[in-house]
Every structure is written in structure tokens, then in C-alpha cells.
Amino acid sequence: MKPESLVELAAGGDLETVSHAWTSVIEEGGTPLAELTGFRDVLTELSRAGHAAQAEELAWTALEMLTSRHPPEELLAVAGAFLGAVEGSEEVRAQVVGLYRSAYADFEGIDNLIEEAGLGGGRPVRRALRTLDVCLNLKEGDHLAARDDDGAARVDSIDPSTWQLSITTCDGRENLDAVRLADRYFPVPDTHFAVLRHFAPERLVKRLSSNLVDIVVDLCRGRNNKIDSDELEAILVPDLLTESDWKKWWTRARTALRKRSNFRISGRAPYKIEFDETPIALEAEMLEAFKRLRDPMDKHDLIDKYVRDCKLRGEQPSDAAVGTCADQLTRRAMELTRDGASEAGLFWMIVRSVAEQVGAEPPRESGEYLRTAGDLRVVFKHIESPALLDLACTALVEARPEDWQDQLLELLPILPSAVCDRVSERLLENGRDASDFEPIIEQIMASSVDHFDALLWLWDGPTQADRIPCPAAVTILTRIFRTLDECRRNDGIPREKSKKIVARARAVLSARKHERFDSCVDGMDPGMGSALRTELRRLHNLGRAVQVDLVNHLDRRCPPVRTGKWIDLWTLEDVLYVTQAGLARKQDEIEHHVNVKMKENAEAIGRAAEHGDLSENSEYKFALEERDLLRARLAQMNSQVAASRVISVRDVPTDYAGIGTKVTFKSEADGIPYELTFVGPWEADPEKNWLNYKAPLAAKVLGRHVGEIVEFDHSGARGRYEIVGFENGLSAGE
């Protein structure tokens, strides 16, 4: 019986069944000792449920039986696991002490070490066992790595009569008792990262380039087998790697780690790395996750990831594992087909995709489903993945040789952009012409909310544009704007659909640095430019940063006849306008913050931790508080950089006061001139009279024109001032 089953019985209070099953497992002797350690969970559950006496009895009986069949050194892991579950049992403690004495009968000072560790009583079991495991494997000259930081030590001498150990650390010599040493250190080979860093740095540089995975293993083991890429970077840069070398090293390391079965890598920026001493069986992990998932696309993506991970490791995907998943998906697809549910098409395409990934033949039923399906538009609308829709189109060609062309033409308006392009090419290759596409394109233009992806296909320009009767680019752009406006005004459009349309529009209009948008509006008639500008002003759902970007590009390609500003850039709360130089300075500040201040703080935490009891260590608490402040400051700076938009010399207005404008004033009282230049917060400089455009004084000036009067008090300039002129304040400063 598996320990999981016994845990459930123990939780339910079925003591008789648990006792009988436990005894059977131990008496039969067929379970490997390594697997018996998992039965500690049964004892833990019994104790938790108020049956500690029964748990102690089962543990004691099991160890008695096992001792008669196995040498003591083989039983220590099982004994330690059982004792950890019933650590209040003096009888089981005595058994485990006896096993250690028998296993290490010839070890000098074993009785003193057992007493010092407190295994017989006086210390928590976990701490006592850790002390024994560390010290029983030590000899003079061995190396140690710190548990809580990147420190290292070398064992100089061991006194088995008192179990006092003398070690050399990077800070000098130190004497520790066995318990304190095991609390702070664990044995490592002399090639360990921390050992090389402190005792042989020249060897570490070479190891960094040739043993990338081993370096990560060493660092994971000192951090509960978890680390992220930011922590790695902070450790290696700049002491061992430059910033540019780090990026190359991390790319190589990430590739190598993905090939190892002991690692899981997840997330992005930072990547999360988890290490397991036991190789992770991909198929077991995948099957376990597959059981928990409910969404069919999540199941598809999981299988896809499993196949990719196998290939990355140079392994063959398990036919049995993939087959198990495919069988479940197929059964579900058949159930939905019998019920007449249009979602069946999604399941059939997932089944085909899984078969394609492992080189298997797709089930005949998937083609039969497409051949007999009624309204394919309804079926295809349930398949949102472009890859699966592409697969569905190919399957449709095979399943319906007599009318696939008519079916694909009808489906074209609801397909994603990339799939539209491949479908149109296939149709043209098989004899369809421009006249076949005309009604389809009219349908896309007329109902763009329902066919927005197809509209974006027309905007990007079909590969076969010379054979497809596309409307003019400006006509398509106008339709995109009107679709966005409808999403803004029409409450009848589902919120999720509206959000998806807006997100796709943002991405497409900003793609390749607005290349397509620029080519469309370049040299446009001023009247048409003015109309587009008016449309843009209404499209608040685009987001103000994107909205402003598009207007700036439109203004440069099709200059308006200005009578003033169209939008107050300085009032945008979610955008921070800065110069390229200011952004570079902020990025340098962030780099210094990460590589100097946070690194110094990490070292301070490590030094403070060496001083002993952390609960009363004020230096350690102060260092942790400083770490939290540094992390908060880093998050704030990263947020500011994410919100920043670079404003260049050509973006600065000189017909009104704006961001980057140098404004010349004249005092009404004495006629003395005064100048202010309004810039981003990272460029502000009182000595140059460069003022942050978000300052209170800026709010009084920005947007004003020549001849207007402003009253202010700034750096000795006090009173009423007339605006007499504007210049580009960045032309000299950039």
C-alpha cells in the first residue's frame, strides 16, 4: 500500500486498518528502504490527529523488525525519518541512538558526539540529526559552505573528546562546537562555488566558463534549492563577470539548465530556478499536472511544453504518457460530439495537435467531425489559438475535398491575421481570384467589430496584395479608428472582446516603430490629416501614451496648421516625459543601486548573520530593514522607467510653452528678462534654471502663449512676468 493511502486512513481515524496495513508493509519486506522514509507522513498524520501513542508504537515496532533484517548503517535514514514524526517518544529516540552507536562503533568520539548533538534528548530531533550528519562526515582539511550566505570555511582541527572544531573562514580563525558548526555550515567538495570564491578565486573564474550548471547547483543548495536570475546576477556581477559577460553567461546557463532533469525554470525577469537532488521525471510531472487542469487549452499547452522539454533534454517523449493524455482528450471530444456541442471542434484540434507533435496519426474521428459539422463558423469561433486554427484549416481541406474552398472563404473573416494570409494564399493557388474575395472584404469592412483580426490582416497587407482587392490603407485606418470608437461608446460589446480589440490595435499600430502608420499618413492631405487627428482625440481607450505617440507621428508626417496645443502632455499622470540623456542617467542609477548598494547590503546581512542568535541581533535586523527599503526603492525606479517616454529635440513646441521649451519672461516692474526651461524630473537643474515640468510653477506656465502674464516667485524672480518668447530648450542640452 502507498503511504498516501495510509495517510488518508489515518486522517479518517481508521486506526485498525492503518495498523494492519503498516505491519503488512514492514513484515513483507518488499518495500525498498528509500521508499519507507515516505511512511513518516503516516506517523505525522496520526500524531496530528491525536493518536501519538499509536504512532510511537508503529514506529518502534517497525524499527525493531527492520533491525533484524538490515545492517544499522542502512537504517539510519528511515530511523531518522520516523523519529522526526514521533520526536516525543523516548523509546524511539533510544532505538535511533543505538543504531548510530552500532553503525559508527569504530568512530572516535561517537558517544561524545551523540551526547553533544542531543539525540538522546535535550535538542530538537532535526537539529540533532543534522549535527550528526555533518560531523560524522568531517575530517581535517575538509571544506564547508555557509547555509545562510555565500561564506565558506576549512576545517583545521577536530577534538573528538569535546567536539570543538577549529575552522578558517574568510575573516580568520574560529572555534565552534559541533552543534553551532552544523547550524551554520554543511560539508562541500573543494570545487564548491563558495569555497573557490574565498580560497581559490583564480580557479573559480575558470570554473564559471566550463561548469555553469555546477555553479547554479552550488548556489541553489545554499538557498533551500531555489534561486532566481536576479540573485544570481547580484552574486556574479561585477566581482566575477561584467554586465555584458553576465548576459552571455546567463543565456548559456539557462540553455544548459533546461537540458537537466534536476531543474525547473519558470517565469521571466527574473527567472525562477528550482533544483531537485532527485532527477525530475518529466512524464510523471506532466501527468500529475494534467489531472489538475480543467481548461482544454491549458492541457494542450502543458503537453506542448512537455514535448519541447523532452527535445531540449535530448529525450524521446513518452508514448505512454502522451497517449494517456490524448485518450482522455479524445473521450471528451467524442462525448461533446454526441451531445452536439460546438466545443467538440476545439478538443478534436487539440487531439490532432498532440498527435502531430509526437509523429502519430490523428484519429479518424477528428476529420469525420469536420466533414459532418453544420455551421463551421460557430465551431471555429470556439478555437481561439492561431496554431490550432491553422491546423483546423488544413484538416478541413483533407476532410471536405469537394467544398473546402467555399468553406474557407466563408471562414476567412473570423480567422486571425496570420491564418488569413495562409488561407488566402492556398485559395489563390487553387484557382480562386479577386472577384471571390470582394464580398468577403466588404463583409470584413462592414462588420469590423466582429472581424477585427481580419481587418488587421488587410491593414498589414496580404502577401498576395496584388491579387486581392484591398481598400486603400487610409480607408482601413479610418475603419480601425471607428472600430475603436465603437468599442468606447457601445456598451453592448462584451468587455473582454473590447479589451482584446484595443490591445490588438495598440500592438499593430505601434509595430515596427509605427512604420505602417507612418507610410499611410506620410504626405497625407491636410484635411484628411485633420480628420484623423479628430478621430484620435476621441480614442481614450487606446491609452494616452499610445494616443500621443500616434498624434506626434501624424504631426511629423502631415503637419497641422497649429493654433495651439492639441493635448496637455504635462497633465498625463501615467506618463513621464524625459530626454534620452535623462533616461540613461536613471538607468545608471538603477545599475549602481543593484550592483553596489544592494550588493553591499547582502554582504552586511551575511556578516551580521555570523554573529550568532539572529532573534536578538540588531545589526542583522537593521540590515534586513535596509534590504526592504532598497528593494522598495528599486521597484519605484523601475516603475518610473517603465512609465517614461523619451522626448527628443524635434518634439519640443516653440509656439507655446511645453515640455522642453525655453520660455523667456520680462518683468512688468523693471523689464528685466528671466528664462526658464521645462524638462523632465531627471534633467532638472536649478543652476541652469531647468525646472521639473511637474513642479507647481510649471503648471502656471505650460500651455501659455506669447503675451500672456504669469505671476510667480522663483529663485529671486518675484512678481508679474510677461511671456515674450520661446526657444527649443533641448537643442543645446541634448
Image (tube, rainbow, N blue to C red):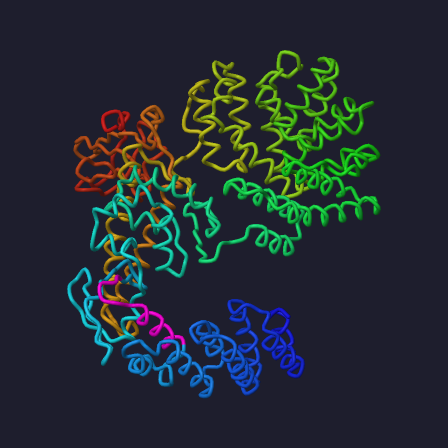
Image quadrant containing the C terminus: top left
645 relative to 314 in the view: left or right? left
Of the pair 494 and 41, the residue shown nearer to us: 41
Give coordinates of residue 304: x percent, y percent.
60, 42
Give coordinates of residue 193: x percent, y percent.
29, 53
| Above or below 345: residue 200 | below
56 relative to 578 in the view: left or right? right
Q: Residue at x 34, y 35 (%)?
A: 702
User: Which quadrant of the view contains residue 418?
Assistant: top right
Q: Which residues are magenta?
A: 126-143
469 relative to 211 in the view: left or right? right
Q: Quick check: is 127 in the magenta stretch? A: yes
Q: Residue at x 63, y 81 (%)?
A: 19
Q: Residue at x 57, y 85 (%)?
A: 54
User: Which quadrant of the view contains residue 3?
Assistant: bottom right
Give coordinates of residue 474: x percent, y percent.
57, 19
Of the pair 368 and 605, the residue shown nearer to us: 368
Of the pair 705 and 548, the residue shown nearer to us: 548
Q: Quick check: is 395 in the magenta stretch? A: no
Give coordinates of residue 679: x percent, y percent.
29, 35
| Above or below 167: residue 727 | above
Image quadrant containing the N terminus: bottom right
- Disc tally is 0
Of the pair 508 and 417, the residue shown nearer to us: 417
